[in-house]
Amino acid sequence: MEMELGEVLLTEEQIKGRVRELAQEISRDYQGMNPVLVGILKGGFVFLADLARNLTIPVQFDFIAVSSYGLATASSGVVRILKDLDTDVSGRHVLLVEDIVDTGLTLNYLVKNIKARKPASVEVCALLLKVSQQKVPVQVKYQGFWIPPVFVVGYGLDAGEQFRQLPYVAALKGQAE
Ligand code: PRP
């Protein structure tokens, strides 16, 4: 299937500015706490990489790979851990870094999963949040942008593993959700 990009929802400049602001907030809130920033793969890798370079405090990084969508463009609601953390996060301050919150199923599951490991704290930083799509509650302390409920790609987000490398966020043509 040929996939064509539609409207650009967030430009590279808009994203850069917001990522800088979020990094400032995180640097201020986690001063002296040596948090573990957990990138949620695959989609979260671009956001985490840019966030990382704007932080002004010591942090550590780890990654967790989950999949809920597979190659489809709609949520299956099934969360699978494909790669777990290497770090023992008990007693640590954990910040989950995600590209997008859609139904909230992925983060709802991950927050519970991380809490069970007895960390000192768990918070979430998400670049994109879809309006009126949450099926389960997720507390997102650091929020980038609220976007309409359309299928988006770029800046880590894919459609059938394409478009992750785009420096902006765009809709896909002819994709309502
Ligand atoms: C996407 C995205 C989030 C999740 C959000 O991941 O990166 O992890 O879906 O959706 P939800 O709020 O409805 O759970 P996906 O499963 O597509 O994997 P990927 O990051 O490897 O592309």
Image (spheres, grey):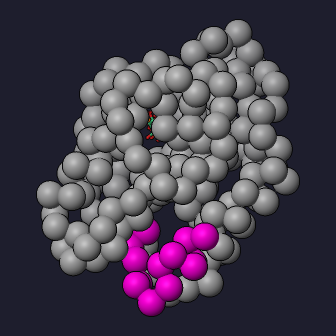
Residue plotted at (65% across, 73% down):
24
- Residue at x 16%, y 63% (from the top left corner): 117
Q: Position of residue 116 (x, y in %)?
A: 14, 57
Quarter of the figure with residue 114: bottom left
Q: Which residues are magenta?
A: 25-37
Ligand 1 occupies quarter: top left
Query: Dividing the image into 4 quarters, which one contains the N terminus?
Result: top right
109 and 5: which is toward the camera: 109
Q: Is residue 86 left or right of residue 48?
A: left
Q: Quadrant of the C terminus?
A: top right
Position in image of residue 174 (x %, y %): 70, 9
Work out whether residue 136 or residue 177 is closer to the camera in this orientation and state it.
136
In the image, what residue occupies the spot 60% across and 70% down? 25
Q: Is residue 30 magenta?
A: yes
Residue 128's place in the image compared with 176, above or below, is below
Q: Residue at x 44, y 28 (%)?
A: 134
Residue 143 sits above or below residue 102 on the image: below
User: Does the image show residue 11?
Assistant: yes
Where is residue 123 drawn, in percent x and y? 39, 60
What is the quadrant of residue 52 in the picture? Answer: bottom right
Lateral position of residue 29 relative to residue 3, left or right: left
